[in-house]
Image: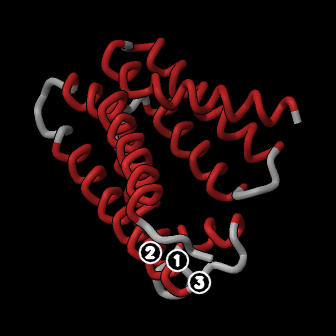
């Protein structure tokens, strides 16, 4: 249990630092960052039972980046994450939307109004992930990657927090109970 918490925490911290590390670190130090990301994802694939294939794929991606010293490939990580999440949310709309599944864990008797709301919320998150991925890709075009680093390492997290917080406020004041 402690190992899992440590690995998750270390992965989150390193993932937040990652865009700035790509920009400010060079040569062997950058390769060490990529190797550390690979090692963390690999350890999570070994020690955590859920989503092993995804964690293993992440470990392999960072291992390839480290092996080839590829800064260019490494910059695609936020794009891959955002489009993967967008695909996950889009595919969930075929049956039970992703956010509806989460809501059902907390409130098994979710009514039709609640199901419609969580479906719309899943669509909003889908749009967010697509736009976030496109913006991270567009910021790769300028030669100087500082804008990419600031956006992917700070602004995108603020936007995620704003979307979560905004939805919580909206739900509290404007949405009828889902009982």
Badge 1 vs badge 2, beta-carbon distance below 8 Å:
yes
Residue 39 percent location from the top left of the image = 67, 31
- 62 or 47: nearer the viewer: 47
| Residue 154 position (above or below residue 45) | above
Badge 3 vs badge 1, beta-carbon distance below 8 Å:
yes
Residue 120 percent location from the top left of the image = 39, 74
| Residue 168 position (above or below residue 5) | below
Instruction: Give neighbour class at mark 2: few <14, some 14-19, many 20+ (Cα, 10 Å).
Output: some
Q: Secondary structure at mark 2?
A: helix
**How far is mark 3 from mark 2, CA to CA?**
10 Å
Q: Earlier in the sequence, mark 3 or mark 2?
A: 3
Could you tell me which quadrant the C terminus lies in? bottom right
Q: Quadrant of residue 23?
A: top left
Residue drawn where x is 47% and y is 13% of the image: 28
Q: Secondary structure at mark 3?
A: loop
Q: Secondary structure at mark 1?
A: helix
Badge 3 vs badge 2, beta-carbon distance below 8 Å:
no
Q: Quadrant of residue 105?
A: bottom right
Q: Which residue is mark 1?
A: 114
Q: Which residue is mark 2?
A: 117
Instruction: Give neighbour class at mark 3: few <14, some 14-19, many 20+ (Cα, 10 Å).
Output: some
Could you tell me which quadrant the N terminus lies in? top right
Residue drawn where x is 54% and y is 25% of the image: 14
Numbered marks: total = 3
Residue drawn where x is 29% and y is 27% of the image: 149
**How far is mark 1 from mark 2, CA to CA?**
5 Å
Q: Which residue is mark 3?
A: 111
Residue 143 percent location from the top left of the image = 12, 28
On the picture, is 110 further left or further right than 92? right
On the picture, is 158 further left or further right than 14? left
**How far is mark 3 from mark 1, CA to CA?**
5 Å
């Amino acid at each position: 249990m402690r190992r899992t918490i440590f690995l998750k925490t270390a992965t989150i911290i390193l993932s937040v630092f990652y865009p700035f590390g790509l920009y400010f670190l060079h040569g062997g130090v950058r390769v060490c960052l990529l190797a550390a990301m690979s090692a963390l994802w690999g350890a999570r694939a070994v020690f955590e039972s859920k989503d092993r294939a995804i964690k293993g794929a992440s470990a392999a991606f960072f291992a390839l980046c480290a092996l080839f010293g590829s800064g260019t490939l490494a910059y695609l990580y936020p794009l891959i994450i955002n489009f993967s999440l967008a695909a996950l949310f889009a595919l969930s709309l075929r049956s039970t939307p992703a956010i509806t599944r989460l809501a059902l864990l907390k409130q098994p008797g979710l009514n039709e109004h609640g199901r419609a709301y969580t479906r719309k919320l899943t669509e909003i998150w889908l749009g967010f992930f697509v736009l976030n991925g496109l913006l991270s890709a567009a910021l790769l075009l300028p030669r100087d990657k500082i804008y990419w680093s600031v956006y992917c390492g700070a602004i995108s997290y603020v936007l995620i927090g704003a979307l979560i917080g905004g939805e919580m406020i909206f739900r509290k004041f404007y949405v009828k109970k889902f009982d």
